[in-house]
Image: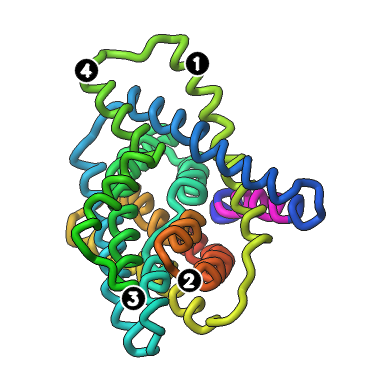
Amino acid sequence: MNIINTVVPVFLIIALGAQLRKGGFVSAEFVKGLNRLVYWVALPCLLFYKLATASYDYQVAGKTFLVVLAGMLGCIIIGYILAAIMRVPAAEIGTFVQGAFRGNLLYVGLPVIIYSFANSGDFSTTQAETVAILVLAPIVPAYNIAGVLVLLASRHKLDRYVPARIFRQIITNPLILACVAGVLYSLIFPRLPVVIVRACSAVGQIALPLALLGVGGALVQGKIVGRRTFAFASSVIKIVVAPLVGFVAARLLGLGPAETRIGLLFLACPTATVSYVMAGQLGGDEQLSAAIIVLSTVLSIVSLSLVVGLF
């Protein structure tokens, strides 16, 4: 029953967003604006507020972050190996590998984690959300750096300008800036003013449902055309290999059941929609990226359900 109550609501909202776009109730421009609102305003408010008011448990959050990082690195390595075996064209390898490791942690992972701990006695929803957001703070820039490197490497553009490109990706990413601001504020000041708490809390509450609607709307606009074998292989790495690597890492680190679930749910997430944007910006294959996002989202229903059911 916990699987149904945890995973199904997330994908019902995604399906609603897809149907609203497919049926013409909302336009492509509306979906684009919605995603901009979530990315630039709602999610940054949520992250800043949660990090600025979080009770920090660096050891637990640090180990959980290492699990997610291990899953990311494992997927990058296996992605390159499989790309060589499958003879993925050189220009598409970066897109293939990025699709294999870059998870949709904020839009899909965070709501699934929150729902999965709704009826947990030993580990509250608030505790789970805090650990999850503390993991997001360092993993978001890690994803950005890795994404830039693999995409540029496939285009043979790893030159002296790469550090500048990575720096630009970091300082212009509102999610990273919100995480840094939240952590710094919590270290300098004892508490947030009530007016800021209420404002950020109110805006942050709309982030997750709007994000899921935006994912659904964006999926309808993506098409699975060409390179379906490559898209499927990359998706399988993302939703199967990532949690398996994470499980091994969690065991080696001695992570508890609750923290293991958080790490594996992050790793079982589908490929992030932002990977399509980065593929376009850095010379990747946008069609392959869109196909990976669609396929991994559908397949992640199984991977997320298994993690919730087993952990």
Q: Quadrant of residue 75?
A: bottom left
State which tag comes first along the sequence, 3 or 1. Answer: 3
Residue 115: % across, % down: 52, 43
Question: Mark 1 or 2, which is nearer the eye?
Answer: 2
State which tag comes first along the sequence, 4 or 1. Answer: 4
The answer to whether the residues at label 4 and label 1 have Cβ atoms under 8 Å apart is no
Q: Distance between the residues labelled 3 and 2?
A: 16 Å
Magenta-span inclusion, residue 237: no
Looking at the rendered structure, the kind of residue marked 1 is: Arg
Looking at the rendered structure, the kind of residue marked 2 is: Asp
Q: Quadrant of residue 250?
A: bottom left
The disc label shown at residue 285, or none:
2
Residue 201 position (above or below residue 99): above
Nearer to us in this view, 107 or 299:
107
State which tag comes first along the sequence, 3 or 2. Answer: 3
From the image, tell me which residue sits under label 1: 198
From the image, tell me which residue sits under label 4: 188
Circle 4 packing at 10 Å, graded few (<14), some (14-19), many (20+), is: few
Residue drawn at point x = 29 percent, y = 32 percent: 180
Question: Mark 3 or 2, which is nearer the eye?
Answer: 2
Question: Mark 3 or 1, which is nearer the eye?
Answer: 3
Helix, strand or loop for disc 1: helix
Q: Give the range drawn in magenta.
A: 7-18
Residue 226: % across, % down: 58, 81
Magenta segment's dominant SS is helix
State which tag comes first along the sequence, 1 or 2. Answer: 1
Residue drawn at point x = 51 percent, y = 17 percent: 199
Nearer to us in this view, 147 or 268:
147
State which tag comes first along the sequence, 4 or 3. Answer: 3
